[in-house]
Amino acid sequence: RARVAELAADGEAGVAAVAAELTSGQEVDRLRDAVESTLGPLDVVVANAGGSPVPPGPVEDLSEEDFRRSVDANLTAAFLTIRSVLPGMTARGGGAIVTMSSAAARRPHPGSPVAYAAAKAGVELLTKDVAHQAGPAGVRVNCIAPETILTERNREWIPEDVQRRLVDEHPIRRLGTPEDVADAAVFLASDRSAWITGVVLDVSGGGVMV
């Protein structure tokens, strides 16, 4: 809400903030209705909710509760978001949906939380299935899979020596920025990608090559 207030103060029109629990279908529908009542029909949706509530560790140490939490936060939230907005886009004959995966889903890695990686792999297949289903109605659905992104949180959490080591693991010798991911999302949401659907775009500095 603070960011919305900043944008409004700068003269930006058409911004709104709505809080919702994205693992609840009812809450997601309420969010959709609130946004559409303020901004009009949704033409572009980025399903960006997620994260790993569970740290990396052996699969035998992963509880059922923590596994379900990871799946709900990532895969269930993406599913409920798509389910909520797709009928309107289909009825209007067009739209673009962008989902968010992770490099953790693109290759096995001992440092990846297994439940998070599995959930993100599910997001990728969900994206492709919906792209196949919704394409005839003019709705495109694509996915972004970022590698390590230097968000404010990661700058604080990842020690500088570890950041330097991670840089060396990428052919493009730097870590990603939020702007790298945002630029990819803008491309996939725009008419510049009008004949692209069902793809997973690795925003990884070459850290993942599939």
Image (spheres, grey):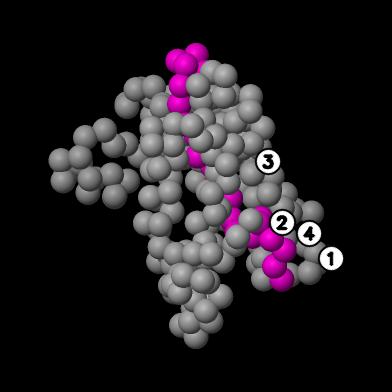
Mark 4: secondary structure: loop
Amino acid on which disc 4 is placed = Ser
- Provide residue 40's location: percent of width, then percent of height: 34, 22
Instruction: Tell me the quarter of the picture where residue 34 sits.
Output: top left
Contact flag, marks 1 and 2 (Cβ < 8 Å):
no
Cα distance, mark 3 to mark 2?
16 Å
> In this picture, is 207 found above or below 143?
below
Mark 4 = which residue?
63
Query: How far is the residue under mark 2 from the one under mark 4?
Result: 10 Å
Q: Position of residue 30 (x, y in %)?
A: 48, 28
Q: Which label's residue is closer to the chain start, 1 or 2? A: 1
What's under tag 2, amino acid-wise? Ala
Which is nearer the eye, 208 or 175?
Answer: 208
The residue range painted magenta reads: 89-110
User: Secondary structure under badge 3?
Assistant: helix
Cα separation, mark 1 vs mark 2, equals: 12 Å
Q: Which residue is labeled 3 in the image?
A: 125
Question: Can residue 49 be seen from the camera position used here?
Answer: no
Identify the image quadrant of the C terminus: bottom right
Residue that label 2 marks: 115
Magenta stretch: includes residue 109: yes
Q: Secondary structure at mark 2?
A: helix
Residue annotated with mark 1: 60
